[in-house]
Image (tube, rainbow, N blue to C red):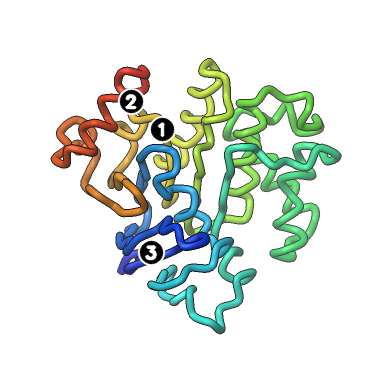
Amino acid sequence: MSLLRVEKLRKTFDNLVVLDSISFEVPDKTVTALIGASGSGKSTLLRAINLLELVDDGQIFFDGQDITAVETDADIVRRKLGMVFQSFNLFPHKTVLENITLAPMMVHGINKEQAESEARDLLKKFGLLEKVDQYPDRLSGGQQQRVAIIRAMAVKPKLLLLDEITSALDPVLVNEVLETVRELKNDGVAIVMATHEMGFAKQIADQVCFLYQGRILERGDASMLTSPKAAETKEFLLRVQQAGRL
């Protein structure tokens, strides 16, 4: 059984169709890359999976549960999800350690000693242990984004959602963030990521979904990025290649 199954999802904003009959599945321990031009629906889809956007029609099944059902408790669902946004969203008045331990302690009821020990283990794993007592404004953009990823992983999510996590970074900082994602992939973390980094998606994705005007126009394995079938996919990838991101 797939960890995530999306069926015929539809979402509109003021009569503008943003998601149009979106269907796909995410097996456990796999990486799905959502690609497409800005405005194609990638971020809205991720927000819908995280129950930050109510959908107009369709269903989302996560970990065996229909999470779009009326009786669903979104807070309980989100305890099994991690989401990282473009803009880091770290608390500026809290240290790296405090940012990472907040959710495990406040949401999951883990005691402070255990939460801090596990946070330090994660920081060590991803090469940031020396930043444990720093505040976000003392970190580079790449370091802030990696801390945001670690914070999401601290609650041990069954699925990690990544929304264009490198788009706000200087190009020289992109690789360090992508290397963190690569390590998560190697650890068997299930990931759905919206990205413009096609070269990275080619290396890491088990499944690629090309969104065009709110629909999944083409879906396949990573070979789709070099051998697309749809004319719209070819045109998009050509533009990406000309921008030096493929």
Cβ–Cβ below 8 Å for labels 1 and 2? yes
Q: What residue type is labelled 3?
A: Leu
| Mark 1 / mark 3, whichever is N-terminal | 3
Disc 3 to disc 2, C-alpha distance: 30 Å
Is residue 220 placed above or below 132 in the rendered structure? below
Nearer to me, 152 or 211: 211
Dot label at residue 3: 3
Q: Where is residue 115 in the image (x, y as percent from the top left)?
A: 73, 52
- Secondary structure of the residue carrying tag 3 is loop
Q: Position of residue 194 (x, y in %)?
A: 43, 43
Q: Identify residue for label 1.
A: 196
Q: What residue type is labelled 1?
A: His
Q: Position of residue 142 (x, y in %)?
A: 61, 26
Nearer to me, 150 or 18: 18
Q: Identify residue for label 2.
A: 240
Dot label at residue 213: none
- Secondary structure of the residue carrying tag 2 is helix
Residue 80 at least partly seen: no
